[in-house]
Amino acid sequence: MVIEAVPVIKAIEKAVGAKLKSAKSKKKVQIVFFSPAGKEFSNITADSFKKFTDIVLVCGRYEGIDVRIKKVFPMVDISTGPYVVTGGELPAMIVIDAITRRIPGVLGHDSSVEENRISSSDVYTRPEVIEYKGKKYKVPKILLTGDHKKIDEWKLKGRK
């Protein structure tokens, strides 16, 4: 099953058609077409989207959307990874989240954006020691020292 072009064209026209008529406002609009064959989405791509005031996410379903919509509107083909899903809704959510978290204040502090700070995939909470089935699991001692320089070094080692 393929989604017809005309309803999608009308939806895009309703959303941003007026902005596409002016050369100045046209530069602030990005239309994204989700496709497994598209450029793989990344944090760099998300950062590049900050310059747009309007982003239209075109989500297909089943076998996709009649490709003629791409002849009517300029679009960028995006893939969220080397896999195929049943529709574009989940990739759209990924893109929305990745772009939104870059807006100042969304995460509370800009230092909360993981790729802008030293972080580790290994995280711990209290208590310092947990016990499960007779075995004790401890937080690494370095994390209990309060020595931020050494903790950052430990986090960097964990990335390799």
Image: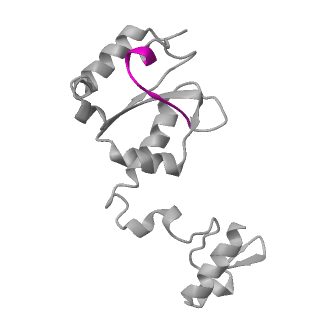
Magenta segment includes 135: no
Q: Is 70 above or below relative to 43? A: above
Q: Is 25 above or below relative to 138? A: above
Bounds of the magenta segment: 70-79
Give coordinates of residue 35: x percent, y percent: 56, 27
Query: On the rendered image, what quadrant is the N terminus found in?
Result: top right
Q: Quadrant of residue 62?
A: top right
Give coordinates of residue 33: x percent, y percent: 47, 27
Q: Residue at x 60, y 73 (%)?
A: 124
Q: In the rendered view, does 48 fall on the left or right side of 103?
A: right
Residue with the most extreme front position: 23
Q: In the rendered view, does 142 fall on the left or right side of 111?
A: right
Query: On the rendered image, what quadrant is the C terminus found in?
Result: bottom right
Q: Nearer the viewer, residue 24 or 30?
A: 24
Q: Residue at x 43, y 27 (%)?
A: 75
Q: Is 96 above or below relative to 84? A: below
Q: Quadrant of residue 4?
A: top left
Residue with the most extreme right position: 134
Q: Nearer the viewer, residue 5 or 22?
A: 22
Any part of residue 31 in sight: yes
Magenta segment includes 72: yes
Q: In the rendered view, does 106 fall on the left or right side of 71?
A: left
Give coordinates of residue 24: x percent, y percent: 24, 35
Q: Residue at x 46, y 11 (%)?
A: 68
